[in-house]
Image (cartoon, helix red, strand yellow):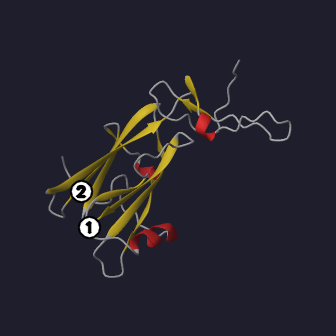
Amino acid sequence: EQAQTQPAGAPAGAEPGKPSELSALLEKAEPGLALLRPEEGHHPAIQSIKVVVKHAPSSKLFLRINGKDIDPILYDGSARSADNRVAVSLWRGVPLADGDNVITATEYSENGARLGEVTRTIHFSGPPTAVELLPERSTLVADGMTPPVLALRLTDKDGHPAREGVVGEYT
């Protein structure tokens, strides 16, 4: 594999910006390779995500999802810490497939040597296929004054929480 001259997915000759959301992440960042967004356990509500990778400022990144290169148009810039010890790069609108999605960021030195790789699995839930009553979170008092609250957990076929905004019927 050959390292790219820009962060993964960056168009040739792109001038990385310094979005303010990246600046906030740099304030507490320590050197090293890491996937900062999406967070571990994140269950996205829509079928695309933002990916933020922390890396060395002089390194090159190669970003993939489910083994496929990220479209370069999705690269949205990078920012460096004031002391130039840490950089973060951002991609927006990275598409997800139904089910598990594996994000892989590979870091290369300026001379092309592989420095490291990080991965994260993000699950994009399908429609709910199972429901579970949560009695400890329900209020089922029949006193004519207390409104009943029925707490349910909806999960997809893989046991992950159904995503926000999914509408369906029940009987």
Give me the residue at 79% from left, 33% from top. Answer: 142
Amino acid found under the numbered disc labelled 2: Glu
User: Left or right: 3 with respect to 11?
Assistant: left
Q: Is residue 86 left or right of residue 151?
A: left
Q: Give how far across and how far down residue 85 sits, in percent.
A: 27, 75
Q: Which residue is mark 2?
A: 107
Q: Which mark is residue 56?
A: 1
* Residue at x 49% of width, y 47% of height: 49
Residue closest to the far front? 143
Whether residue 128 is visible: no
Q: Which residue is farthest right? A: 144
Which quarter of the figure is the C terminus placed in?
Answer: top right
Residue 144: quarter of image: top right
Above/below status of 120 relative to 31: above
Please, what secondary structure does the residue beneath circle 1 have?
loop
Q: Secondary structure at mark 2?
A: strand
Local packing at callout 2 (Cα closer than 10 Å; few below 14, some 14-19, many 20+) is many
Residue type (three-letter) at the residue carrying disc 1: Ala
Which of the labelled discs sits on residue 152, or is there none? none
Quarter of the figure with residue 165: top right
Q: Nearer the viewer, residue 135 or 54?
A: 135
- Residues at discs 1 and 2 in contact (Cβ within 8 Å): yes
Residue 29 sits above or below residue 4 on the image: below
Q: CA distance from mark 1 to mark 2?
A: 9 Å
Where residue 29 sits in the image (x, y, percent)?
35, 70
| Residue furthest bottom as drawn | 83
Residue 115, percent from left and from top: 17, 58
Mark 1 crowd level (few <14, some 14–19, many ≥20, 10 Å Cα):
many
Q: Pinpoint residue 131: horizontal percent, then vertical percent.
A: 58, 26
Choose the circle earlier in sequence order: 1 or 2.
1
* Left or right: where 12 falls relative to 23: left
Q: Residue at x 27, y 51 (%)?
A: 118
